[in-house]
């Protein structure tokens, strides 16, 4: 289990989101006094694969006084608890609070800078005992997520990247969720073959027609090579989902056949993948 804590504005919410994306059961702003009772409950659904991550910080009034004693007692009982502490430089924290216009939890009555300095001083003992310290000063959101995922990846089995292969018709618009769009309108079109027109791309006759050319074979080889290259890089970055959209004119023939081929290639490598034919039943 991870306790995610640190300075306000240092990226704790981003860290929790990264952990949630890779399969952790996450709760933000958990009162430290409730932690012993929480750990006595049956594990939440979905928490078995990766683990539990709890966000705790000075927003909760009893956090500073009770954190070290509570964690100490739980560790004595055998609970594996790791503290992940996030921090950032003073000027960066000021810029972040100015950009979001959110109040600092300790700034009331004394100003933002004084609140930041007070919080840093109060959390100094916790920082010194943290198992993992992350300075987010120079990190963007994606780099911070990658750093967090890198810490936990070496210790436990994380939920793998979920891929979606979606066939669609350009005449009905691009899928809003698409990360990668593949245009297959250059392939031979069964629409213009009378005996094939009523069928769809899941029919073996359509697949044979679409895939029979050298261009189709070369195209699939190049696209699958790109997918095989990109997926490990996206996983390293901490990306949770990847949507690959394959489009033809109407979304019934060519895109369906090619999407099926890409899906089978990805599934054969043991990846989590879903196949969706968005426009297969649209009128032609």
Image (spheres, rainbow, N blue to C red):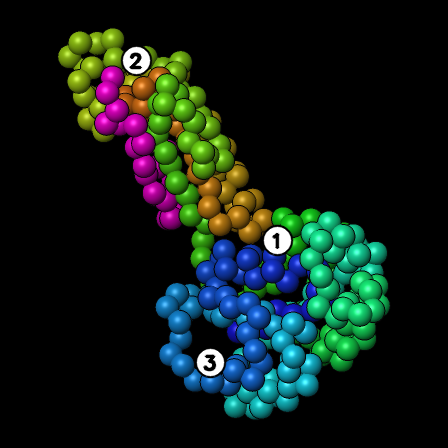
The reply, left or right, for residue 29 in relation to residue 118 is left
Tell me if label 3 and label 2 are in contact, CB under 8 Å: no
209 to 110, vertically: above or below: above
Name of the residue lying farthest toward the left: 195
Residue 82, percent across and down? 60, 75
Q: Is residue 142 magenta?
A: no
Could you say whether the residue bearing mark 3 is in a helix, strand or loop?
helix
205 to 133, vertically: above or below: above
Quadrant of residue 155 within the rendered picture: bottom right
Residue 255, percent across and down? 34, 24
Q: Residue at x 46, y 46 (%)?
A: 241
Q: Residue at x 53, y 61 (%)?
A: 19
Q: Nearer the viewer, residue 282 or 239?
A: 282
Could you say whether the residue bearing mark 2 is in a helix, strand or loop?
loop
Residue 65, percent across and down? 68, 85
Q: Nearer the viewer, residue 60 or 267?
A: 60
What residue does disc 3 label? 38
What residue does disc 2 label? 189
Q: Which residues are magenta?
A: 257-284
């Amino acid at each position: 289990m991870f306790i995610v804590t640190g300075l306000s504005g240092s990226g704790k919410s981003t860290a929790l989101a990264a952990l949630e994306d890779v399969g952790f059961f996450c709760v933000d702003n958990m009162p430290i006094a409730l932690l012993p009772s929480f750990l006595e409950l049956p594990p939440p659904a979905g928490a078995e694969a990766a683990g539990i991550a709890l966000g705790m910080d000075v927003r909760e009034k009893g956090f500073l006084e009770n954190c070290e004693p509570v964690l100490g007692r739980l560790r004595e009982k055998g609970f594996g608890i790791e503290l992940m502490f996030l921090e950032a430089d003073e000027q960066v924290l000021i810029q972040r609070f100015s950009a979001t216009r959110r109040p600092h939890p300790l700034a009331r009555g004394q100003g933002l800078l004084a609140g930041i300095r007070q919080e840093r001083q109060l959390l100094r003992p916790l920082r010194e005992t943290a198992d993992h310290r992350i300075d987010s000063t120079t990190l963007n959101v994606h780099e911070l997520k990658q750093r967090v995922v890198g810490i936990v990846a070496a210790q436990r089995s994380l939920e793998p990247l979920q891929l979606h292969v979606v066939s669609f018709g350009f005449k009905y618009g691009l899928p809003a969720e698409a990360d990668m769009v593949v245009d297959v309108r250059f392939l031979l079109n069964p629409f213009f073959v009378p005996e094939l027109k009523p069928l769809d791309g899941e029919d073996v006759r359509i697949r044979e027609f679409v895939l029979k050319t050298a261009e189709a074979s070369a195209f699939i080889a190049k696209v699958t090579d790109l997918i095989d290259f990109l997926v490990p890089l996206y996983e390293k970055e901490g990306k949770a989902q990847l949507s690959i959209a394959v489009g033809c004119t109407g979304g019934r023939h060519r895109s369906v056949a090619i999407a099926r081929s890409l899906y089978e290639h990805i599934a054969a490598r043991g990846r989590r993948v879903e196949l969706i034919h968005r426009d297969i039943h649209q009128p032609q």
